[in-house]
Image (cartoon, rainbow, N blue to C red):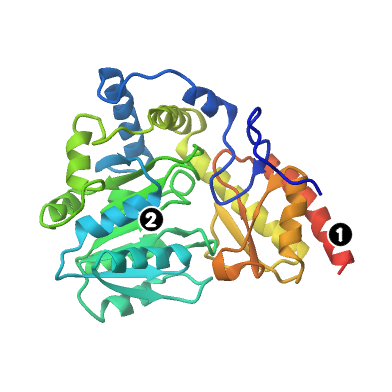
Amino acid sequence: MSEIHFDKEKGSQIKLFTPGPVYIPERILKEMAKPNDTHRSKPYAEMHQLVEEGLKKLLYTSNDCLISTSSATGLMEACVRNLVKKDEKALFFSIGAFGDRWYKIGVSNGKVSVKEGVEWGKPITPEFAQEALNKDKYAVVFIQSNETSTGVYNPINEVIPVIKDFGALVCVDATSSMAGIKVEVDKLGIDVCLASVQKCFTLPPGLALCSISKAAIEKTSQVKNRGFYFDFLDLVKRSEKHQTPTTPPIPQIRALAAQLDYILNHEGLEKRFERHERLGKRTRMWARDINFEMFPEKGYESNTVSTMKNSLNIDIGKMVSTLLSKGYRIVNGYGDLKNKTFRIGHMGEVTVKDLENMLKILTDIVSDLRLNQ
């Protein structure tokens, strides 16, 4: 089996069905190759403004939308540093590795942090949230919409109203669902909704973005020692001029402007959400037909990344590497779930036909592995 190496001439030829980064279409790569003006120029500001306006439509919000030169983890840390005072408590709901990460960020920044988690594979339910919030007074609550490690989609439409009833600010990590699954920020009252662009947005890594409410901006003004790079007030101040505080990756922002135009005016938001719903359903059908059990509790499966149990007791590593030799990449389970689960990403510009082609090859690989057990 030939190994895959860095190709300095052609770039990667692998079709990615991973939870991110995802496969990038040629039209986006061409957009990034165009020349740009500086980040303090009028042309840049006009481009930045197009991104802000597009994000507001995508997130169904009138809130400010900010751009950060970082991964989503940077904005996760920004939420912790900007919104939690020294004498306040922060609650982190966790259903997997990235919920645990947000809690660790809280602890590492010296915030009074409490984690309320459930068994991996299960969601945070409204009842669980109510019980957790009744235990103490929390200023800010942090929650994932889509947990990339477990393939669980939290029922945030039901959970967030419970949180808001307790008067807390709500921060949502929508990294692996924003631009793939509908999130209505204003309707739910989300104070910060964040993501990075290398997943459902279908861009190369290098940017994170978020919406931020007036309440969150006001709270930020009351918090000391917010740090420098991720200071929300500085980000908001610069966004008023349609700029960022420091030099951003301008090619990615150009590509984001083009992609938002494509999402909103070519594919259409509802059609995009429906396509991701079909991709999720088709992957679950495949898992059922081949006798892989889904890892998430039934009814809470993600439509952007599917996590399957190794219920056939096959060599997951070999399955992944054999598929890679055929030109497709999926991934093993995350962290402690390695070899116990595997994950298929079906987000971004993936079509049902693309997915069908990969699953057909994967089916043959699984059959061969079972025959040789």
Residue 238 vs residue 157, the one in the foreground:
238
Q: Position of residue 23 (x, y in %)?
A: 59, 39
Question: Which residue in the structure is indicated by mark 2?
Answer: 173
Q: Could you say which quadrant of the image residue 24 lies in?
A: top right
Write the residue at 37% across / 69% down: 93
Question: Which residue in the structure is indicated by mark 1?
Answer: 368
Write the residue at 29% across / 28% down: 49
Q: Position of residue 194 (x, y in %)?
A: 35, 50
Q: Judge whether residue 297 can be spotted in this image.
A: no
Examine the rendered structure and indicate whether residue 252 appears above or below residue 30.
below
Residue 316 vs residue 359, the one in the foreground:
316
Look at label 2 and name its amino acid: Asp
Q: Is residue 129 left or right of residue 8?
A: left
Q: Secondary structure at mark 2?
A: strand
Q: CA distance from mark 1 to mark 2?
A: 39 Å
- Using the image, tell me which numbered label, if any, was put on residue 340: none
Residue 50 vs residue 332, the one in the foreground:
332
Residue 162 vs residue 79, the one in the foreground:
79
Query: Callout 1: few (<14), some (14-19), or many (20+) C-alpha neighbours within 10 Å?
Result: few
Look at label 1 and name its amino acid: Asp
Which circle's residue, 1 or 2, is located before the other in the chain? 2
Q: Is residue 134 left or right of residue 117?
A: left
Q: Position of residue 15 (x, y in %)?
A: 67, 41
Q: Could you say which quadrant of the image residue 140 lies in?
A: bottom left
